[in-house]
Image (cartoon, rainbow, N blue to C red):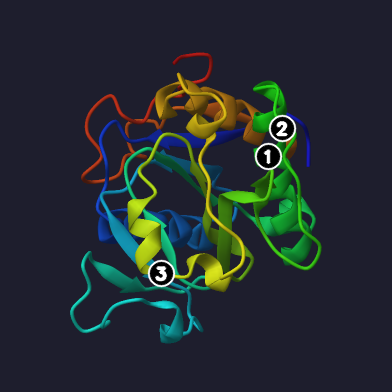
Amino acid sequence: MAPNTPAILFEARSPVPFPLAWEWQRRLQRRRLDDPAAPDALLLLQHTPCYTLGRGASLEHLGFDPAHPPLPLHRIDRGGEVTHHLPGQLVLYPVLDLQRHGGDLHLYLRALEDVVLAVLQELGLEGERIEGLTGVWLEGRKLAAIGVGARRWISQHGLALNVDCSLEGFGAIVPCGLADRPVGRLVDWRPALTAAQVAPLLLAAFARRFGLALRPPGPQEGLAGLGEGEGRSGLGES
């Protein structure tokens, strides 16, 4: 696709319950399915604490009774196993026409990894991939979980990057089903770092990798429940 193709950015200012963010994604996906000429869209947010399970995720990776979870538990239509969302973790949900971006789901996963690796490089850190697995690691600790879904090549779900979140809640699960791969967060390497500081780096890296020019939503492009002034571009701000 042509470089600097416009895409709408929605950026939430406060943590978002998972069901609301999931509805936003589905609404944006429906918009793209109904109008093939509509622009791509991107949601950047943090979640209120919860756990999510991929469509085929095993309950064996839960350290609690799924009928009585310690936090809200959601079975959703992405790939992958169980993961944990909470404030201090940046979550990026691209709603893209993947046919404009290579038409290959596996290449799309690698592209999302590229985005995180670029952010780490900006911070002077050397992230890594692990062959046969999806995500990004730093010194053996998993910083970014990636799980996606698509309907008629329009994507939803995406990546979660741990910045300055608590890691306590990860102890109740086997994150991504990988018992021998501990979870980490950027603040363990860059103690003064905050999610607000990393957000513009993540957006800029995503825009570069996918050739997008992010813009705020127009008057008829808003999402119910996303506060006024929260759909701005955010690039270059901290």
Dot 1 lies on which element? helix
Judged by depth in the image, the label closer to the viewer, 3 or 2, is: 3
Q: Is residue 138 visible in the rendered structure shown here? A: yes
Q: Which residue is mark 1?
A: 115
- The correct choice, above or below, for 124 with respect to 12 in the image is above
Instruction: State the residue in front, 90 or 178.
Output: 178
Residue 231 placement, left or right of 137: left
Mark 3 burial class by Cα count in 10 Å: few <14, some 14-19, many 20+: many
Identify which residue is drawn at 69% across, 43% down.
139
Dot 3 lies on which element? loop
Dot 2 lies on which element? helix
Q: Amino acid at mark 1?
A: Val
- The correct choice, above or below, for 21 with respect to 191 in the image is below
Q: Which mark is residue 173?
A: 3
Q: Looking at the image, do the residues carrying marks 1 and 2 touch, with CB atoms under 8 Å apart?
A: yes
Identify which residue is drawn at 29% across, 30% down.
13
Q: Which mark is residue 118?
A: 2
The earlier-in-sequence mark between 3 and 2 is: 2
Mark 1 burial class by Cα count in 10 Å: few <14, some 14-19, many 20+: many
Q: Looking at the image, do the residues carrying marks 3 and 1 touch, with CB atoms under 8 Å apart?
A: no
Q: Amino acid at mark 3?
A: Ile
Q: Quadrant of the C terminus?
A: top left
- Residue 137 image position (x, y, % from top left): 67, 48
Instruction: State the residue in front, 34 or 222.
Output: 222
Q: Is residue 211 visible in the rendered structure shown here? A: no
- Residue 104 image position (x, y, % from top left): 77, 64
